[in-house]
Image (spheres, rainbow, N blue to C red):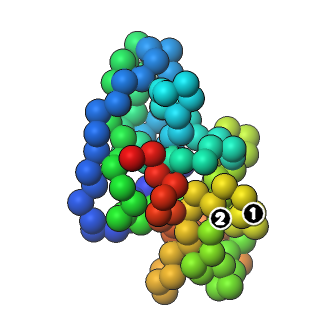
Amino acid sequence: MDFEIVSDEILRTVIVTIASATVIEAGDVCELSSGLPVKGTASGAKIAYSPFASAAGDTQIDLSVGNEFVLKGTGDAVFAVAQKGTEVDLVVNSGAQEIDVGTSSTDVFVVDISENAGTVGSTAAIRVKINDGKNLF
């Protein structure tokens, strides 16, 4: 699982049509390609979170609506306190979706500002929210 919800917010989802050959794992961040959801990439400008998986042959998937929830993921570099509240990107490394803590071009995430935002010097368990205005819905 690339990302995991860590907040107690209610996750609202919407059923979205998906290409039958597209495979999305639970915990993936998705973007649209020709109007259909696919696994998110570093160039995706609008994203949604997928709490559920879709297998080859599926034609629908539930995707998140909004950005009220907090996600936990792995950074591509270590967390620093100065990153709290900054806009950062999604990056894919060796097939795994990660938080690009050093880049700000698509700005699809905002690093959490809470005391649990991350552990200084660690890439694990960095908390982000989907940036307002950068979600698919």
Give residue 98's position: percent from left, percent from top.
64, 53
Q: Is residue 83 above or below residue 102?
A: below
Q: Nearer the viewer, residue 87 or 102?
A: 87
Locate residue 60: give its quadrant. Answer: top left
The residue located at (46%, 52%) in the rendering is 135
Is the Cβ of the residue at disc 1 closer than 8 Å to that at disc 2?
yes
Give residue 3's position: percent from left, percent from top.
49, 53
Q: Is residue 27 visible?
A: no
Q: Is residue 123 visible?
A: yes
**Callout 1: SS:** loop
- Residue 36, labelled with which disc? none
The residue located at (27%, 68%) in the rendering is 8
Q: Is residue 32 above or below residue 136?
A: above
Q: Marks 1 and 2, Cα distance to the nearest angstrom? A: 6 Å
The reply, left or right, for residue 131 in relation to residue 11 is right
Give the residue type that dot 1 points to.
Answer: Thr
Answer with mark 1 or mark 2, whichever residue precedes in sequence: 2
| Residue bearing the label numbered 1 | 103
The residue located at (37%, 18%) in the rendering is 58
Q: Is residue 24 above or below residue 7?
A: above
Give residue 52's position: percent from left, percent from top.
36, 38
| Residue bearing the label numbered 2 | 88
Give the residue type that dot 2 points to.
Answer: Val
Q: Nearer the viewer, residue 112 or 115?
A: 112
Q: Is residue 27 above or below residue 129?
A: above
The residue located at (26%, 51%) in the rendering is 12
Please identify the residue farthest to the front as the structure is shown: 133
Locate residue 78: give its quadrant. Answer: bottom right
